[in-house]
Image (tube, rainbow, N blue to C red):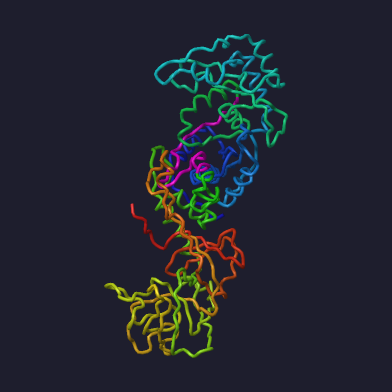
């Protein structure tokens, strides 16, 4: 991965101060996703912060799957998470699972019971919520809060052995039911769940809650900085309380940053799943989704994602980032690396009446105007061509410089042609243009200095391959997507063109290859594309055309 040069941010300022003061002598971070879904653009920010912070200070960053809720987790998500991180260009030092610490976490729970700061509670989930109180009213103690240490140890052991049903008992921390911070009102540490775990099998029927397992996992791994998004700020006191009660010598420091909020899209797993289940999108990797697998399938380069995160910056303040910034980063990256090819998306036939019948020639078209090392594409040229339907008008509007009767244009890299007439079907649809060419204008140069205002792209009809193009746009019509999500779906978020034409000499492509279709935008070969069924996804247009 290329060297990263980062400007300072408030997290790095804190680390700089603590390293200078000797509070810490090393930097160790971790990225700890729960494997219950696919990563999205918001996770990309956390990934960049965790890995790049460790890299900046010569430390390490681990990947830890926080797999404490097997009912919602799957190895499919684990594999996808690892693939996404690698795709972004990062490499973790160690791979851990929270489930690997279940024995240790269980020992910590027993330790807290023996200290008298944890107890087994028989209240139901609804009763626990009722007893917890509200933001304006304190909670009240559970009637089981004052059980003896011996009774709690016995009940917890029986929970562990599977003697109770789901929801029958929980283990709670004994803190303060009147705390203004509701997370400190005797949070649940363990719940009963008779379900097989994807890593530990049927060894356990009780599983630790995230707020209990997470800080202990951080501390066990000797993480120095637990970097997380701002919604966990309220959980910091409970994070610190568990670490302090267990008695770690080098406790991690939790630092929160503002999460990435992007307009015109959703990142909520619940809402994404609703889109999938309702058939609004084809799956989690639908190119209209801002999951990392969706962005990758659409053709967004990893570098563009990282550049976008860098431009967004690291701050504490809540903000909403415009989707156009992500698109701009994508254009900047692809503009430099994507070869140019000519592809006609909505073809109309052109017959060059004065071009010899049966003749065909090979023209060399540069692949990138700024990178001659990319070489040229050898494309064929003959009497019959395809051009874009919108490159012709029977009655041209003002400042229209493309094809219309009597007008001359330049075919990119080929010849000047003049439109003489056109054919229509019985419904008035244009089906063919008749033109003549200037044989002295080969390569697009003017033989006598005459000016030609319009240049259009083309494909040889006798050497063309039919392909499909998926034109993707934003999935929602409104900037803010709430519970009205299904009411603001953009009906034009996907337009499928299935009669596109590309020269077969440059149709030897594979999934993931990205090109600039001249004058059209950037397109990427879809993962389902085959030699006999070429499919291109529009990654982004050449210029932003979205109207707010």
Residue 203: where, in percent of width, then height?
72, 29
Residue 342: where, in percent of width, then height?
48, 72
Magenta range: 248-274
**For residue 13: magenta?**
no
User: Which residue is at the front of the view, 456 or 307?
Assistant: 456
179 is higher (above) or lower (below) than 217: above
377 is higher (above) or lower (below) than 178: below
Residue 480: where, in percent of width, then height?
38, 43
Left or right, 501 with respect to 262, comes to: right
Can I make out residue 32 in this image? no
Single out the residue that lies furthest toward the front.
Answer: 426
Single out the residue that lies furthest toward the left.
Answer: 398
Q: How many labels does the image show?
A: 0
Image point 66% across, 24% down: which residue?
Answer: 106
Can I make out residue 541 in this image? yes
User: Which residue is at the front of the view, 371 or 498?
Assistant: 498
Image point 49% across, 41% down: which residue?
Answer: 271
447 is higher (above) or lower (below) than 497: below
Residue 61: where, in percent of width, then height?
58, 42
Q: Quadrant of the N terminus?
A: bottom right
**For residue 260: magenta?**
yes
470 is higher (above) or lower (below) than 195: below
Left or right, 210 with respect to 18, comes to: right
């Amino acid at each position: 991965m290329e060297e990263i040069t980062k400007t300072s941010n408030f997290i790095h300022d804190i680390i700089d101060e603590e390293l200078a003061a000797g509070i810490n002598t090393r930097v160790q971070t971790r990225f700890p996703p729960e494997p219950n879904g696919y990563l999205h653009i918001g996770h990309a920010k956390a990934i960049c912060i965790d890995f790049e912070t460790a890299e900046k200070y010569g430390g390490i960053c681990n990947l830890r799957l926080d797999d404490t809720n097997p009912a919602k987790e799957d190895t499919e998500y684990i594999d996808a998470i690892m693939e996404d991180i690698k795709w972004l260009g990062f490499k973790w030092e160690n791979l851990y699972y929270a489930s690997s610490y279940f024995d240790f976490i269980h020992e910590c729970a027993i330790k807290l019971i023996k200290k008298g700061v944890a107890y087994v509670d028989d209240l139901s989930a609804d009763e626990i919520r009722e007893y917890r109180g509200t933001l304006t009213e304190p909670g009240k103690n559970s009637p089981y809060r004052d059980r003896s240490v011996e009774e709690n140890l016995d009940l917890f052991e029986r929970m562990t052995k599977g003697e109770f049903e789901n929801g029958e008992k929980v283990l709670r921390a004994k803190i303060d039911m009147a705390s203004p911070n509701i997370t400190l009102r005797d949070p649940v540490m363990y719940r009963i769940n008779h379900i097989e775990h994807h890593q530990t099998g049927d060894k356990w029927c009780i599983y630790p809650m995230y707020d209990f397992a997470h800080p202990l996992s951080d501390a066990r791994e000797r993480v120095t900085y637990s970097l997380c998004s701002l919604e966990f700020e309220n959980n910091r006191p409970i994070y610190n309380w568990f670490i302090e009660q267990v008695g770690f010598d080098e406790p991690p420091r939790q630092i929160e940053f503002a999460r990435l909020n992007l307009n015109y899209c959703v990142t909520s797993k619940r809402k994404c799943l609703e889109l999938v289940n309702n058939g609004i999108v084809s799956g989690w990797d639908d190119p209209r989704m801002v999951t990392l697998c969706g962005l990758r399938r659409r053709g967004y380069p990893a570098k563009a994602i990282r550049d976008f995160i860098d431009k967004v910056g690291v701050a504490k303040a809540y903000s909403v980032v415009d989707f156009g910034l992500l698109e701009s980063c994508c254009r900047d990256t692809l503009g430099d690396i994507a070869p140019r090819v000519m592809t006609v998306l909505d073809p109309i036939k052109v017959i060059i009446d004065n071009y010899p019948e049966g003749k065909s020639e090979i023209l060399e078209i540069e692949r990138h105007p700024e990178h001659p090392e990319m070489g040229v594409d050898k494309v064929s040229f003959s009497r019959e061509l395809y051009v874009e339907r919108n490159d012709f008008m029977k009655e041209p509007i003002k400042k229209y410089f493309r094809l219309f009767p009597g007008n001359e244009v330049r075919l990119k890299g080929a010849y000047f042609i003049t439109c003489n007439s056109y054919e229509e079907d019985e419904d008035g649809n244009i089906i063919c243009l008749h033109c003549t060419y200037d044989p002295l204008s080969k390569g697009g140069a003017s033989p006598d200095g005459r000016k030609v205002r319009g240049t259009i792209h083309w494909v040889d009809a006798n050497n063309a391959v039919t392909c499909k193009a998926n034109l993707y746009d934003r999935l929602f019509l409104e900037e803010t997507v709430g519970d009205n999500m299904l009411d603001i779906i953009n009906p034009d978020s996907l337009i499928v063109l299935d009669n596109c034409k590309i020269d077969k000499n440059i149709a030897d492509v594979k999934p993931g290859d990205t090109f600039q279709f001249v004058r059209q935008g950037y397109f990427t070969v879809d993962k389902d594309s085959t030699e006999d069924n070429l499919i291109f996804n529009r990654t982004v247009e050449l210029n932003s055309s979205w109207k707010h």
